[in-house]
Amino acid sequence: MKFGYFDDQNKEYVIKTPKTPLPWINYLGNKEFFSLISNTGGGYTFYKDAKLMRITRYRYNDVPADCNGKYFYIKDNDVIWNPGWQPVKESLDSYECHHGMGYSKFLSKKNGVETSLLTFVPLDDACEISSLTLKNNTEEKKELQVFSYLEWCLWNADDDMKNFQRNLSIGEVEIKGSAIYHKTEYRERRNHYAVYAVNAQIDGFDTDRDAFLGEYRSMENPEVVQKGKSSNSVASGWSPIASHQLNVTLNPGEEKRYIFVLGYIENQEEDKWESKGVINKKRAELLLDKYYSDAAVDEAFQELKQYWGKLLAKFNVQTKNEKLNRMVNIWHQYQCMVTFNMSRSASYYESGIGRGMGFRDSCQDLMGFVHLIPERARELIIDIASTQFKDGSAYHQYQPLTKKGNADIGSGFNDDPLWLIAAVSAYVRETGDVSILDEMVPFDNEIGTEVTLMEHLKRSFDFTVNHKGPHGLPLIGRADWNDCLNLNCFSAHPGESFQTFGPSEGPVAESVFIAGMFVKYGKEYGDLCKLIGQDDEVKRTDYEVEKVYKAVLESGWDGEWFLRAYDANGDKVGSHVCEEGKIYIEPQGFCTMANIGVKEGLAEKALSSVEHCLDTKYGIRILAPAYTTYHLELGEVSSYPPGYKENSGIFCHNNPWISIAETVLGHGKRAFDVYQKTCPAYVEEFSEVHRTEPYVYSQMIAGSDAIRFGEAKNSWLTGTAAWTFINASQYILGVYPTLNGLSVNPCIPLEFGDFTVTRNYRGQVYNIQVHNPGGVEKGVKKLIVDGIEVEGTIIPFEENKEEYHIDVWLGKE
Ligand code: BGC
Ligand code: IFM
């Protein structure tokens, strides 16, 4: 069952009912000012950092769900409704929510009034614009009252939810004309404030929540709206809000449009800071003036659309498979932008006050994003590398506003260092910009400790070299990619969180997954060394990589698949000798991607074991059989009920690893089958089972042991976004950036047909036509670049060329 449809022409998903199984959201904003917005108008706004600079308040764990947003109430005599249905929930005569690239649009009809509400964040300003158009479709004159509503968050969203003894006394606002200023904390910090304004003369306002709602009422039935009259309340402490009243008279057929602007303003040094907490409104007024007219707003919206049009044109594929085209050309890349911006900080499942930017997460996110805006990927690499320690380990997370490592979480996830190599390699392969390797980057953000980024990569590499266990495999530390595989926590104190066991950390638990990573990214580090002429280092990397390769063959192979790990007792994890958790997905994917055991025939076996032991109709499970009891020696992985999360859930993130691994072995059909199983456009058909948004990936789908098998959770912020785009674009379609240029080597099902790819690479346009006359799964028989046949699969890079025309002929030798 579907709740909407894809409109590929407009790059939108159109939701046809407000009653989706869960809130289906979108992200507004591309760089610093962001909003989350649901299909019923819920959500919240922040500047740079969802924890420290929260502009509007959201209510967690609330009933009904998805409560608080930027709402508009329309009152037509006794009938009151919202264009997005919530919070009044008055049934609408028609409703559509269009989630597009950086904007959402609500189209609805009620009582003969047609409304169109477009909301977006313009490209270069810290504000959100809501353009509300009301049209009278009746023969009678309409006298409407329209009320806007949002609730301010007292900036630090964490404190805002806890520190009531202070918070209830600090709220301050100022009203000037149609502009409502939120200036809480201005007295103290004097450096920022927010404003909510409308480009019309208002007929009233409210800034005190209780006055607006009335006693013991909720947003569902505000007293002010029911009365049709604002109370002109001025908040003093308690809960400040911003609400405007507009009395709107519409003659038959008449239409009126209002522009609401929610802005964030940061004072600059030269701004005059006055005493008594009076804010300097100059910058706010400039901003509000800028978006006062309809024409200015239309222009800003067109710019946003053009921006996305240009960005997405950087990778465009045309196959006969409409769903694949849609996902690769639009939604995969869009989700990559969102994960790049958010890491794992703010979604409807990440509160924005817990995790900030993840070292591991952001490194992977940028691998799927780097072709879109390489300069931003470059900046992020430097930020991430600056949180590394001298021994190569790193803070697991950092706060986006301060860019400082999070000391509460600390370090100890032993896969982290290697992800930095993966990210830098992806950046240099994409851009050819080796100058980044010479950038001076500090350790732990400490001035005076700067070394080159290349030296950071060396420390990353050496972290694994210097942290190996009894089998010569990398030590896992607190966990590796699988945060819940806590193999050293056997002596954690009861009640302590799984990952905060510090002193009891055992020395011996080893990870075959990290071994796979080391072989893959160790080689990529070696390639970078070679590129810049560090020949001795190349030899050293070859030697170290070979050692770990051998260690995997000797101690990391279980007979039918790759072992997952050794625990702190030296016992095997993910082995046929285990009663539960006999096989894990991660090493099968990563070792094969690293080419371990490919020539020995082991990878082939491992992937067929994945198909037999882990696959389900909704995707591949992370492990099987699920753990049915808690194991102290395994940690959080066994804490989840069978079928959920890391305990045998279908973790979407590592499904593409298997798909990529299948392409390494040349299995085009299987690679594509794996891709399709979890891919949103293919899953859309059974949205009532899957339940999360059908245009983006979720972190996890409940596995076959769960009662709600097939139900997804934690949509949007998942490494699946980057990996699935990498899989589809670089391995299935086969357009892979190497250090020496773009390579084309697809791996597709026999009946896939010919296809074209347009790829912007290093500032040049590559028009690639792939022909598969004999219907093979993999194998480039002939590569013709601008009429000239070229050896191999790499298109020679030519400086000063603008466009290439490439014909790739697949076939048997
Ligand atoms: C979650 C895991 C997650 C980890 C991150 C755990 O509490 O259950 O899914 O990966 O935290 O640190
Ligand atoms: O790898 C992690 C990621 O960093 C956060 N979400 C869960 C994944 C698997 O545990």
Image (spheres, grey):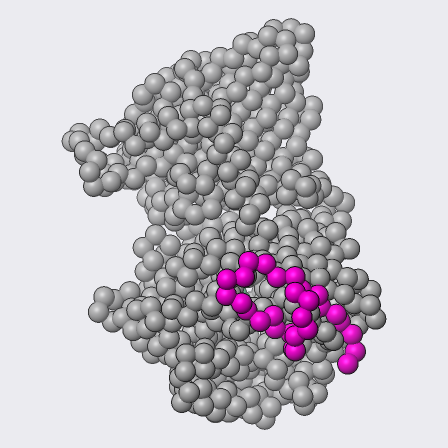
Residue 750: image location, x then y, percent: 81, 68
Is any atom of residue 787 visible in this view?
Answer: yes
* Residue 263 sits in quarter: top left
Q: Is residue 328 above or below residue 169?
A: below
643 with respect to 216 (left or right): right
Region rendered in magenta: 786-813
* Residue 211 sits in quarter: top left
796 is within the stretch colored magenta: yes
Q: Nearer the viewer, residue 667 or 649?
A: 667
Q: Nearer the viewer, residue 696 or 709?
A: 696
Residue 764: image location, x then y, percent: 54, 59
585 with respect to 270 (left or right): right
Is any atom of residue 518 visible in this view?
Answer: no
384 with respect to 777 (left or right): left
* Residue 718 sits in quarter: bottom right
Q: Is residue 3 above or below residue 807?
A: above
Q: Is residue 607 above or below residue 365?
A: below
Q: Nearer the viewer, residue 298 or 199?
A: 298
- Report the residue at 54% width, 17% height from top: 256
- Report the residue at 47% width, 50% height from top: 346
Instruction: Indicate the quadrant containing the N terminus: top left, top right, bottom left or bottom right.
Output: top right
800 is within the stretch colored magenta: yes
